[in-house]
């Protein structure tokens, strides 16, 4: 075997080990919780020494970023598939589809959704032990999702279904924050909402979506509805 072949095999082995460690970390973080998990737990689950785990990852925070990256990639794949399948006839319907996809993601992949929520609501990206590469990849994936919303808003402004006086980027950020916030509350406070307000999580989500849409659609669009 030539030198190139040996190097390729070594790289492939590294990738396999790296994946095995992330897989093990997922099982640990998703069962014990991120805060309660340790690098010792991850090493034991992966059946590697702690030293080996540190060869591939500098910290628990970095591994968590890798898990969030998996979640973001999965969500982006779902968004692309759903938008392609449904072929929304206008911007409002496309925003509705994005919200439905995020809802489905939260139901089908609750642990990835939780990981993204903790990232969105915290300051993990400012941890010094998170390498720039992991942080930047996470940022890039988040920006890709935001880019979907920006494109839809711009489309809506062109077809006069969305108010043209809105700042596109700020509105996209608010839409994203509102959607993940509502889904998070509906999930975490489901019993409280049902028992004290006689409202199902689905009803809360629907009402929130209607409120969000009314705040950004044009008067003409509002009169049509």
Image (cartoon, rainbow, N blue to C red):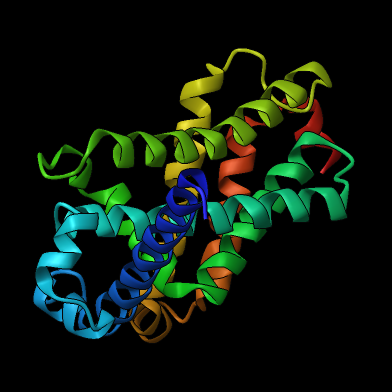
Q: Position of residue 39 (x, y in %)?
A: 12, 70
Counting from the top left corner in percent of width and height, residue 216 is at 62, 31
In this view, the residue farthest toward the front is 1
Looking at the image, residue 160 sits to the left or right of residue 34; the answer is right
Q: Vertical placement of 177 versus 157: above or below? A: below
Instruction: Please give left or right for residue 188 compared with residue 37 in the image.
Output: right
Compared to residue 94, the image places residue 169 above or below, namely above
Most extreme residue toward the top is 165
How many numbered marks, from 0 up?
Answer: 0
Classify residue 194 by image quadrant.
Answer: bottom left
Q: Position of residue 56 (x, y in %)?
A: 24, 56
Left or right position of 211 against 132: right
Q: What x and y, as percent, mark residue 96?
A: 70, 50
Task: Pick the residue in front: 4 or 13.
Answer: 4
Is residue 152 shown to the viewer in this render?
yes
| Vertical side of 118 occupied by 220: above or below | above
What residue is at 42 percent from the left and 53 percent from the top?
A: 11
Look at the image and tell me in which quarter the C terminus lies: top right
Q: Is residue 38 visible?
A: no
* Closest to the observer, 172 or 130: 130
Q: Residue drawn at (54%, 63%), measured in percent from left and top?
A: 205
* 100 left or right of 81 in image: left
The residue at 40%/38% (across/down) is 137
At horizontal 85% and vertical 45% (from top left) the residue drawn is 88
Name which quarter of the figure residue 180 lies in: bottom left
């Amino acid at each position: 075997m030539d030198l190139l072949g040996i190097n390729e095999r070594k790289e492939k082995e590294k990738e396999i080990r790296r994946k095995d460690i992330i897989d093990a970390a997922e099982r640990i973080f998703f069962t014990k919780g991120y805060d309660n998990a340790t690098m010792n737990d991850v090493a034991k689950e992966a059946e590697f020494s702690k030293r080996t785990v540190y060869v591939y990852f500098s910290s628990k925070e970095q591994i968590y970023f890798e898990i969030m990256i998996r979640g973001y990639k999965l969500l982006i794949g779902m968004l692309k598939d759903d938008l392609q399948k449904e072929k929304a006839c206008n911007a409002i319907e496309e925003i509705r589809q994005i919200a439905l996809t995020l809802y489905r993601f939260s139901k089908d992949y609750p642990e990835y959704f939780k990981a993204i929520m903790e990232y969105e609501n915290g300051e993990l990206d400012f941890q010094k032990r998170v390498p720039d590469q992991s942080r930047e990849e996470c940022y890039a994936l988040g920006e890709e999702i935001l880019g979907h919303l920006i494109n839809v808003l711009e489309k809506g402004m062109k077809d006069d279904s969305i108010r043209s006086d809105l700042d596109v980027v700020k509105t996209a950020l608010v839409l994203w924050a509102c959607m993940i916030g509502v889904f998070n509350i509906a999930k975490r406070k489901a019993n409280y909402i049902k028992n004290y307000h006689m409202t199902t999580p689905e009803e809360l989500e629907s009402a929130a979506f209607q409120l969000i849409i009314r705040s950004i659609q044009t008067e003409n669009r509002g009169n049509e509805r």
